[in-house]
Amino acid sequence: MLIHDLQSRLTYLSLLAALAALPLAVNGQETEGISRTRHGYPDFQGYWNNASQTPIERPTSLGDKRSYTLEEARALESTAQQSDTQKAAPLDPDRAPPADGGVIMFQADENFANTRINITQINGEYRTSLIVEPADGRYPYVEGGASKDVFGQWRAAGLGAYDGPEIRSQMERCLHVGSQMPPMMAWTYNANYQIVQTEDYFMLMSEMAHDARIIPIGTERRDNEFSKWFGNSIAHWQEDTLVVHTTGFHPQQSNFFMKSSDQFEVTEYFELVSDGEIFYRYTVTDPVIYKQPLTLEMQLLRKTDGEQIYEFACHEGNYSLPSILSGARRAEADARAALENN
């Protein structure tokens, strides 16, 4: 009897240990084959990259073509790979100098920038644009919507492009790049991110500008006392998907990739489809700029083990911006002097 009772207890304890080793299902739903935190939620932590040659907006020449064929995608990726290989080749030391009066733009910088090679692949489709709604893959601007952000309003009021620092973009001023916020796009480099999460917070940091969003999970939204660069975010779990809703954005966050007003709102969805891939989707509403909601989808792919992100330092705002504005003041003074002399 004692031996039988001891065996029963050992069997019971072994069963408990086995159950404890299993991943905890969240809300009764479990995605197989993914890592989980000790709290049972999908573990997004690590380093990620979302570089892709798929544009946000679909080229008009493609019409309603939502995706490329496999052959078309491979051809585009091959062309990009050839360009990247050619870019890395040594320059001819005997090449001719630029023509007199020619303008040198970013040729030197482009030799060090990443070539975006991959076509974004979602559910087996090689996407022609990140925008999936509207179906034409284009920004659904209201009439004149692209000029209705705060910068457009200032220009309409007569503020010139060089009249003060405020009219210059926040990126040029080294205030905020926004690559860790929708549209979640770095420029031509630094498309890398780090995610750290706890039971109560989700942190997303971009290598570009080294900005970090720290998003509370499951708590009540704090009052919008003032607008913020990253807005006022709150997250919650829908089964295995982390949903983040954000309002209260700073109006000067509007940028080339994503025009916005003080009515800009965004809902983001983070889904860990495997330990190596995050399916990221977000929907934007802004009745001042867009006539309907705008939805984009993209991949974040885990970086190779051992890779990390590095500190990013922005100096344009410290050096270039004063030069731009002082140059504009000098041009104005020269113009006044020319009028007086005439």
Image (cartoon, helix red, strand yellow):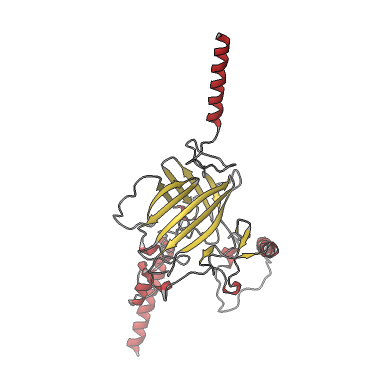
Residue depicted at x 34% and y 73%: 154
Give the residue furthest to the top.
1
Residue depicted at x 35% and y 56%: 228
Residue depicted at x 54% and y 36%: 23
Give the residue furthest to the left.
225
Residue 246 lies left or right of residue 21; in this view the side is left
Q: Is residue 211 above or below residue 152?
A: above
Residue 329: tell me if it is visible.
Answer: no
Residue 305: tell me if it is visible.
Answer: yes
Image location (x, y in percent) of residue 223: 30, 52
Nearer to me, 147 or 123: 123
Nearer to me, 322 or 293: 293
Image location (x, y in percent) of residue 46: 53, 44
Residue 66 lies left or right of residue 331; in this view the side is right
Image location (x, y in percent) of residue 266: 42, 58
Residue depicted at x 32% and y 87%: 340
Image location (x, y in percent) of residue 41: 49, 41
Nearer to me, 244 or 64: 64
Number of numbered discs visible in the structure rendering: 0
Residue 107 appears in which quarter of the rendering? bottom right
